[in-house]
Image: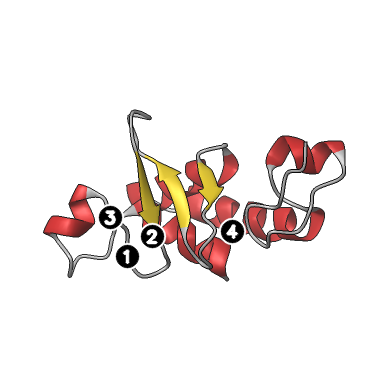
Amino acid sequence: MNMKCKRCGRPLRSAMALRTGYGEHCRRGVYRAARVLAASDSKIAQRAAHALLTAEITPVKHGRVWRIASSSGESSYLASPNTCNCDGAMYRPTANTEYHSVAAAVLAA
């Protein structure tokens, strides 16, 4: 199995990296950001932290775009740091408060 890091795209080799989906360097940064988001009072930030820590995110071949599972887990959306194609972002384009974009911004940083 030739898995790649969800954040940087480098090949994963260690058992921990294969389990989490992030290389050592990327995992430290993503987990640090997820802890900050999880400690927030914002439901959006907490949901973004959950998405980052679980296997709900997969990179897309296009740079800085990720496929993120919906809250129900029945569908998924494409997200970048600026927008996503979920119903919330499609119908409220000025309210960039979807957790999909927040999680993508963490991965793009």
Is mark 1 in CB contact (under 8 Å) with mark 2?
yes
In which quadrant is the C terminus drawn?
bottom right
Give the label, 4 or 1, closer to the camera: 1
Give the label, 3 or 2, closer to the camera: 3
Residue 32 visible, this orientation: yes
Q: Where is residue 62 drawn, in percent x and y?
A: 50, 64
* Left or right: residue 45 compared with residue 57: left
Q: Where is residue 75 drawn, in percent x and y?
A: 33, 35
Residue 42 visible, this orientation: no
Q: Which mark is residue 101?
A: 2
Query: What's the amino acid at mark 3?
Result: Asn
Dot 4: what SS?
Answer: helix
Q: Which residue is mark 1?
A: 83
Residue at horizontal 68 percent and vertical 62 percent from the top? 8
Query: What's the amino acid at mark 2?
Result: Ser
Is mark 3 in CB contact (under 8 Å) with mark 2?
no
The residue nearer to you, when weighing 15 against 53, is 15
* Residue 90 lies in quadrant: bottom left
Query: What's the amino acid at mark 4?
Result: Ala
Q: Looking at the image, is 94 positioned above or below residue 13?
A: below
Dot 1: what SS?
Answer: loop
Badge 1 density bin: few <14, some 14–19, many ≥20, Cα 10 Å:
many
Residue at horizontal 43 percent and vertical 46 percent from the top? 68
The residue nearer to you, when weighing 55 against 11, is 11
Distance between the alpha carbons at the discs numbered 1 and 2: 6 Å
In which quadrant is the N terminus drawn?
top right
Q: Which residue is mark 4?
A: 33
Q: Which mark is residue 85?
A: 3
